[in-house]
Image (cartoon, rainbow, N blue to C red):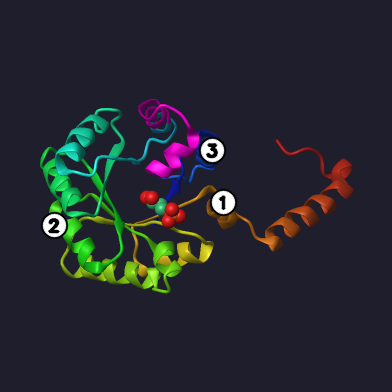
């Protein structure tokens, strides 16, 4: 399963990209708004740091406006993905943009039937929101499993991008449920790598090494 970072913050992106395990970026109008930067320049900068897919969302709410914005966003960088909401207008825009050969991430998906509609419209990614479903006492991880199963049965090529991830447990659940990608905030990405026994182990190995460093010589 690929791992994406859900942020528009360049410092966060540079830090995680340096680990060599970052496959792509998702943004949304709220995340971009936090950065208080020019939208196009920010997305182009992100696209230079991360060679994988970088999602940038339209802000029009009518199909015509989404298509116009989507066509413009698609010219910003080779690896940019246009993000459209899962509304009737968003489906219409997705269908038109997909026919133009533009890759679309259909976002704000909360049901299996919505995912099917996104796929049939030609979505490259569909983004079911795990955390926001959990927030209203529904099982977000179960939705990922159901969509992955349906796409597998029907050999649907649209990739399942588990979004609104709030915890490392969500990441594991998305992977086991068959998601193609999980996108998560910086905090969750950092949580994935840490384990108290790893930190303790490094500390004790280094302490033992320090005791004998004059005997064992230097490494490299
Ligand atoms: C990503 O594509 C989504 O916009 C994002 O994961 C939403 O996350 P949130 O529910 O934590 O805002």
Q: Residue at x 44, y 32 (%)?
A: 49
The disc placed on residue 45 is none
Q: Quadrant of residue 146?
A: bottom left
Mark-to-mark CA distance, 1 and 3? 16 Å
The quadrant the N terminus occupies is bottom left
Q: Which residue is mark 3?
A: 18
Residue 123 appears in the picture as rendered: yes
Q: Nearer the viewer's eye, disc 1 or disc 3?
A: 1
The disc placed on residue 120 is 2
User: Secondary structure beneath disc 1?
Assistant: helix
Give the mark nearer the N terminus: 3 vs 2.
3
Q: Which residue is mark 1?
A: 187
Q: Nearer the viewer's eye, disc 3 or disc 2?
A: 2
Give the mark nearer the N terminus: 1 vs 3.
3
User: Secondary structure beneath disc 3?
Assistant: loop
Residue 207 position (above or below residue 101): below
Magenta span of residues: 25-45
Residue 46 position (above or below residue 194): above
Q: Is residue 194 left or right of residue 104?
A: right
Percent across and percent down for residue 16 are: 53, 42
Q: Residue at x 42, y 33 (%)?
A: 46
Residue 169 position (above or below residue 188): below
For the residues bearing labels 1 and 3, Cβ distance under 8 angstroms: no
For the residues bearing labels 1 and 2, Cβ distance under 8 angstroms: no
Q: Is residue 140 left or right of residue 61?
A: right
């Amino acid at each position: 399963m690929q791992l994406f970072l859900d942020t528009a913050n360049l410092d966060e992106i540079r830090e995680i990209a340096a680990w060599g395990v970052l496959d792509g970026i998702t943004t949304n109008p709220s995340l971009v708004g936090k950065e208080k930067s020019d939208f196009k320049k920010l997305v182009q900068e992100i696209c230079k740091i991360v060679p994988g897919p970088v999602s940038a969302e339209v802000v029009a709410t009518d199909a015509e406006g989404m298509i116009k914005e989507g066509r413009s966003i698609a010219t910003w960088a080779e690896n940019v993905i246009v993000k459209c909401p899962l509304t009737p207008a968003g489906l219409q825009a997705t269908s038109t943009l997909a026919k133009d050969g533009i890759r679309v991430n259909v976002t704000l998906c909360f049901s299996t039937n919505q995912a099917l509609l996104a796929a049939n419209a030609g979505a490259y990614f569909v983004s079911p929101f795990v955390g926001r479903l959990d927030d209203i006492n529904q099982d977000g991880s179960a939705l990922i499993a159901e969509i992955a199963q349906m796409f597998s049965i029907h050999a649907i090529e649209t990739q399942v991008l588990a979004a609104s991830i709030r915890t490392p447990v969500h990441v594991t659940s998305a992977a086991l449920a068959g998601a193609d990608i999980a996108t998560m905030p910086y905090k969750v990405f950092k949580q994935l790598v840490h384990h108290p026994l790893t930190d303790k182990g490094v500390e004790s190995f280094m302490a033992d090494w320090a005791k004998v460093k004059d005997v064992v010589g230097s490494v490299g």
